[in-house]
């Protein structure tokens, strides 16, 4: 039986704007619950910042899904997949349990393992002269982590009270900037730097991110383990899309929403860039939260206090991503992430560490783009991982005997430091800037140096390299300032103080990285499940944690051994049927 993907206005119960993991999970749970949904994506492929891309027919790079926490048998990620009958096709591969992260620097290495006791043992080895500080730090983070729970539906008062009461003696440290907490433990400046680099995984600086947010990070990974989806990050979007279309939902790619329509403080639908209007009583936005309010909705529809709040919001640091195809086998090393510190120059003192953060990470005080890029390349710690190593059986990732290596770090969003004007992003003219090309070359050279730290011998065997800048994120995903992690994790924008699903406009809901469930893969997906629960009037998270399967497994298509997740999430049109979209995709690709 064919399920038409063409939809009449009167049939739509909810429109989802954007196909990040928040929008996809919301659409999938709504479709599985019997709602008629229409998901609209401005790009040609689903996934938002989580999508993959291919080059030369032999390489596949993961843009956003690097590692995911809490994927064990009792974890919330497993519950979300089981709830959609996807647990048999989306499988999770564990990273190295003894060191899912390795923090490396000249004459220094810290393994970050799964398990709190194992973590303490590694900290004591890495900091032999700072055992008292280590024990304080470990006790604080363990206590705070156990009190945090992102799985529930956070409220601005109830959740805060729960955190404080559960944290006991460590509660006064919840709101303290992470760097200040490290200093209060008695760590040396080098140790503060070493323990701060993982803040980059949340697109944050240790000078601003609250200790509570880092406790949540440790709880996800030290407490829950680190995993990668078999088949690469695109398989998540493919799974959600399969549930949506098989349960009567509809998806359109290359469908840009220009306006979310509001009348008398209530959503009525959306207008697309080509002028088409689709009506619905519910609109769920997975678009950038600032752009949602300022461009799609219009701040004139917001209460006065919320207008002021939107103007005060600060986005997280954007990320730059280097993608390298190398004639080098990363499987000769442990299946770990690496946080590579090039030198200790910025750790001469606490003031020098703060100055480095202000100048290089915030981009303050540079006269030209090239000088900033050189400072970034010389001193900025960077995150490295190999998607092809995560899943060695994924043949699309890299040619035999070769590997992919992705290098990432946080950066200022100021277009001036990248050598282009802000107005050049939408048109793509920024790519023609000579300064932009020079800055990219300098930054890529710095990334190669970090690669050599993590994977000795790899930097001289590069066969393909690309750099994704903040402009890349803004142009293809639509993020304000190129920030894929949404609102910055600072004290007034963390945990229950972040926006929840419901808004002041009746029928408008928010999902994604800016919501109260936090940035990253797990937070985004959870925000979508909660949004679907708000629309249906059900506590879906409670249901799936209790084992309920919301989707009908018999409706799902079979995925063969040659299933291509990227091909399966491209080319959705207004008239394609479910069978036409999912047939013939085995073995296809770019």
Image: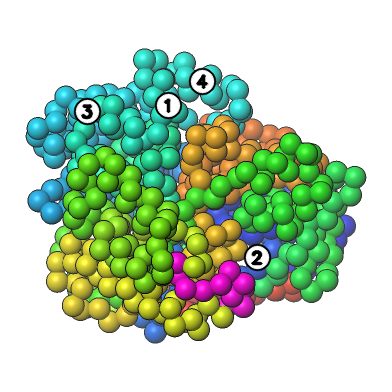
Looking at the image, which residue is at 65% across and 68% down? Answer: 42
- Secondary element at image label 3: loop
Quick check: 134 above or below 297?
A: above
Give the x, y percent position of residue 393.
31, 67
Range of magenta residues: 417-428
Q: How is the image coloured?
A: rainbow
Q: Quadrant of residue 536?
A: top right
The residue mark sitting in front, 3 or 4, is 3
Which numbered dot is residue 41? Answer: 2
Looking at the image, which residue is at 74% across and 57% down? Answer: 296
Residue named by callout 3 = 186
Q: Are marks 3 and 4 in contact (CB under 8 Å)?
A: no
Quick check: 109 above or below 245?
A: above
Q: Quadrant of residue 429?
A: bottom right
- Secondary element at image label 1: loop
The residue mark sitting in front, 1 or 2, is 1
How far apart marks 2 and 4 lie (CA) works out to 37 Å
The residue mark sitting in front, 4 or 1, is 1
Residue 24 visible (yes or no): yes
The earlier-in-sequence mark between 3 and 4 is: 4
How far apart marks 1 and 3 lie (CA) works out to 18 Å
The residue mark sitting in front, 2 or 4, is 4
How far apart marks 3 and 2 lie (CA) works out to 49 Å
Which numbered dot is residue 174? Answer: 1
The earlier-in-sequence mark between 2 and 4 is: 2
How far apart marks 3 and 4 lie (CA) works out to 28 Å
The residue mark sitting in front, 3 or 2, is 3
Q: Is residue 307 left or right of residue 95?
A: right
* Residue nearer the viewer, 46 or 321: 321
**Residue 278 shown in magenta:** no
Residue named by callout 4 = 162
Give the x, y percent position of residue 319.
43, 59
């Amino acid at each position: 039986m064919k399920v038409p993907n063409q939809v009449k206005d009167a049939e739509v119960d909810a429109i989802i704007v954007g196909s990040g993991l928040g929008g996809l999970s919301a659409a999938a749970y709504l479709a599985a619950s019997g709602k008629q949904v229409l998901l609209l994506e401005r790009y040609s492929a689903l996934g938002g910042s989580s999508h993959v891309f291919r080059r030369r027919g032999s390489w596949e790079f993961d843009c956003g899904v690097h590692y995911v926490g809490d994927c064990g048998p009792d974890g919330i990620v497993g519950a979300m997949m089981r709830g959609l009958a996807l647990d048999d096709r989306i499988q999770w591969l564990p990273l190295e349990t003894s060191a899912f992260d390795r923090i490396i620097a000249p004459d220094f290495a810290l393994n970050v393992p799964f398990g709190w006791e194992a973590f303490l043992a590694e900290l004591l080895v890495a900091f032999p002269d700072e055992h008292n500080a280590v024990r304080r730090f470990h006790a604080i983070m363990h206590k705070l982590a156990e009190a945090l729970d992102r799985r529930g539906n956070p409220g601005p008062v109830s959740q805060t009270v729960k955190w404080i009461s559960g944290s006991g003696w460590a509660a006064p440290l919840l709101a303290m900037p992470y760097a200040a907490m490290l200093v209060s433990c008695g760590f040396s400046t080098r140790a503060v730097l070493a323990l701060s680099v993982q803040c980059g995984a949340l697109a944050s600086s240790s000078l601003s991110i609250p200790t509570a947010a880092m406790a949540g990070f440790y709880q996800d990974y030290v407490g829950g383990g680190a995993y990668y989806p078999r088949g690469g990050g695109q398989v998540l979007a493919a799974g959600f899309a399969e549930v949506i279309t098989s349960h009567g939902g509809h998806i359109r790619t290359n469908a840009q929403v220009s306006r979310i329509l509001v009348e008398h403080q209530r959503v009525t639908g959306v207008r697309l860039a080509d002028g088409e209007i689709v009506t619905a009583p519910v609109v769920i936005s997975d678009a950038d939260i600032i752009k949602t309010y300022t461009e799609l909705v219009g701040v004139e529809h917001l209460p006065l206090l919320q207008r002021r709040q939107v103007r005060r919001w600060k986005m997280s640091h954007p990320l730059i991503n280097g993608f390298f195809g190398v004639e080098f086998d990363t499987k000769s090393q442990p299946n770990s992430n690496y946080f590579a510190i090039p030198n200790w120059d910025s750790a001469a003192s606490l003031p020098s560490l703060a100055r480095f953060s202000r100048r290089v990470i915030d981009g303050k005080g540079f006269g030209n783009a090239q000088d900033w890029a050189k400072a970034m390349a010389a001193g900025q710690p960077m995150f490295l991982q190999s998607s092809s190593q995560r899943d060695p059986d994924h043949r699309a990732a890299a040619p035999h005997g070769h590997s992919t290596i992705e290098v990432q770090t946080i950066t200022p969003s100021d277009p001036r430091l990248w050598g282009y004007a802000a107005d050049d992003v939408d048109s793509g003219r920024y790519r023609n800037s000579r300064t932009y090309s020079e800055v990219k070359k300098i930054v890529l050279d710095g990334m190669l140096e970090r690669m050599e730290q993590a994977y000795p011998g790899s930097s001289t065997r590069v066969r393909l390299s690309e750099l994704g800048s903040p402009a890349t994120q803004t142009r293809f995903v639509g993020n304000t300032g190129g920030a894929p992690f949404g609102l910055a994790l600072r004290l007034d924008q963390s945990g229950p103080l972040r926006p929840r699903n419901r808004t002041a406009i009746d029928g408008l809901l928010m999902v994604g990285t800016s919501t109260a469930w936090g940035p990253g893969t797990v937070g985004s997906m959870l925000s979508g499940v909660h949004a679907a629960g708000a629309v249906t009037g059900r506590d879906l998270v409670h249901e799936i944690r209790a084992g309920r399967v919301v989707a009908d497994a018999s409706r799902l298509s079979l995925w063969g051994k040659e299933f291509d997740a990227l091909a399966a999430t491209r080319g959705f049109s207004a008239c394609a049927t479910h069978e036409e979209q999912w047939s013939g995709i085995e073995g296809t690709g770019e």
